Amino acid sequence: MIIKEISKVPIPFGMFSNSGSCQRFLKLFCGVLAAVTSGFLYTIYLAQSHPQKLLFSTRQVLEQELMFQGEGAMYYSFFKDMLRAPSFERGVFELSYNNNTVSLRTINAVQQMTLYPELIISALYWMSDNHDAPDPVFFYIGIVLMLQGIYMSSLFVTSWILSGSCFAGILTAAWFVINSADTTRMYDSIPLRENWALPYFAFQIAALTGYLKNNLNPSTERLCYLLVSASTYTFMMMWEYSHYVLFVQAVALFFLDGLSLAQNDKVHEVHKIYLFSLFLGYLLQFENSSLLVSPLLSLVAGSMLAKCLQINVREGTFMAKVMKIIYIFLVCAISLTLHLFIKAVVPHKDNGHILKFLEVKFGLNMTKNFTMRWLLCQASLQTPSQDSILRLTQSSLLPFYIVVFTICLLSVAQVIVRRLCGMPLKDKLSIIHGRIGERPEIVYHVFHSILFGSFAMIFDGMKYLWTPYVCVLAAFGVCSAELWITLFKWIRLKAVDAIMLALLLSTIVPSLISTMLWREFSPKLPTEYPPLEDIYQPDTVELMNWIKTQAPVAAVFAGSPLLMGAIKMCTGYLVTSLPVYNDEDFMKRNENVYQIYAMRSAEDIYKILISYKANYVVIEDSICNEMGTARGCRVKDLLDIANGHVVDEDGDSYAYSKYGRFCHEIKFNYSPYVNYFTRVFWNRSYFVYKVNSVISFQY
């Protein structure tokens, strides 16, 4: 009797059922409420636990802004420019034709730095009442924190749709927070593009997961389709690398379609969304040619063209299998041909440095180029450390993920074999079937995990696209009775009622995991972030105050790109370079200005700075005397290699140059350095030198 009743309950999540009963409506309402609550609580948690909280409440505006470190400082500086403009329209125009940021260059900052988040948030600030609106820094942070709440709610909903249990959403949220070092970059710098874009990507995946489910009623399917459309386009506008992420997602969907594991035309409807988003993004991003030469466009267009050429034959026959192989081959061939043709025809910004980087990364080429080697040394582009694996294991996430992923992968493999043998998929699955690999949304998440997980094993920064969905998949698995039944059918469990045991385990196991996580990690969460003294830098505050009060209004500053981003944010002065690595000119500027830390003559450095109209140069003691970074990845080591100042003898490296290191020699104030430069400010961390307009020869 129990089996008969349970078999009537379809696996799809209640929201996507055709039943309109009060019980299902109540389940839907409670689930949505739980998802919204999880996002709200996560936003509050971030606001209360973020290491910058105290600084925002006790420091002056300058000190608050300096908490935006690295690239974040550059992005926030443009938000300030928008607020200083007399009108929103004028602000957009000035950023689109910007000549007051980088010396001797007019840039389209909106397109170059992907400033659409700043345009949106500045528009919201302009529409608010200036008397009631909070300080810009609080307003900016508040919007980003709200997005993180949407991020959490989206992950909650995704695991809820997959498992049909709100418990999976709660467990997903717990694992996400506990493994925050590997799931989010919120604690690196708030304005990073990833913190703006990934919430929309999570929202898109939640909507896509619902859309891929079988047996949706038309209104629900239409709603999911609209949500996928809106979130895909928004994600594409938030991050310059979003179309590469969507390309990986499109590859996962291509496998789903090529192996006939999803309902007809659903994948191709998603392809239409990609095309629409690319076209609209191209128009609204100042005719951004990088979207036209994107591999996403080639794959989607190739898939749609191959679909038009495909001949319909009866499924299960030998000819059907041959046609499926031909279809997959056609998609690959047409996509590659289109990509090469578009790149040859469409004028676009050359991304050759990306290919060179990949060649060096995989050992296919060797280079002494400073920028390539500097990128290789960045933590986000290196192979993940064992610390990440250890953290994921200690939180129990990785072990459960491996078990769940293995079961799902084997079940999907079984389904693929059945499809190759001509066996059709079941339209309606119940819990007693134990065929979790026949659910297209599960298959998608398996392919998603394989693809993004492969990249995460190569580039540490890719883990932020993989680990959150590791939380989702692991939580779904332990909370899904269907997965347990799939396992029991494989081991042919007959001693007990498999269905009742599966229902019990799908409740007991998550409860035990949650209890363990609470006891083990709840006391550690408030203390796992860096102390405030590691963030607050009084020397930097002193430097910015000196620049604002002592430097001429038209002065141009030179120094490391990260520091120049902070100077631009805090003072508004022109700089020679910015932390931008998607443009050849910016990369060349960065390398040239970094020569102040190389073994170069005073005359060489003077010529470089004058070529960029620099009036002041800022030398950072932390770079000049860098000790902590592994040898070979320090800025001065990279410069010595690029300049040919390193000699290898018997496996040992020796630095050689007839000039001393500029950042050291200039501090001694002797000729010829005093002929070209005059020290005007210094403290423990920074030395500021005025670039003499008239060279005075002193001996």
Image: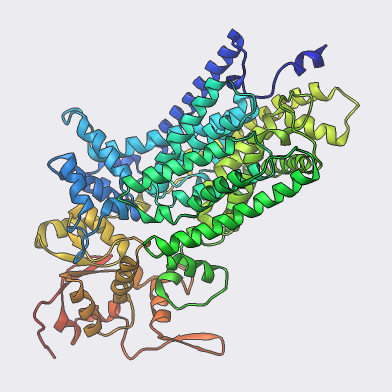
- Horizontal placement of 32 versus 142: left or right? right
Residue 523 visible to an observer of this rendering: no
Q: Nearer the viewer, residue 301 or 685?
A: 301
Image point 72% across, 40% down: which residue? 313
Whole-percent x, y for residue 614 in the image? 18, 70
Q: State the image coordinates of residue 123 (x, y, percent, origin top left).
A: 24, 36
How does the figure colour the protein chain or chains? rainbow
Identified at 39% across, 42% down, the residue is 196
Residue pictured at 81% horizontal, 42% vertical? 421
Quarter that holds the N terminus: top right
Q: Is residue 678 above or below residue 71?
A: below
- What's the residue at 40%, 48% (across, down)? 239
Q: Is residue 100 left or right of residue 336?
A: left
Point out residue 296 in the picture as x, y percentages from the top left corner.
50, 51
Residue at the right extreme, as displayed: 495
Q: Quadrant of the C terminus?
A: bottom left
Q: How many marks?
A: 0
Image x and y of residue 87, in percent? 15, 40
Residue nearer the viewer, 538 or 360: 360
250 is higher (above) or lower (below) than 203: below
Which of 322 and 516 lies nearest the eye of the viewer?
Answer: 322
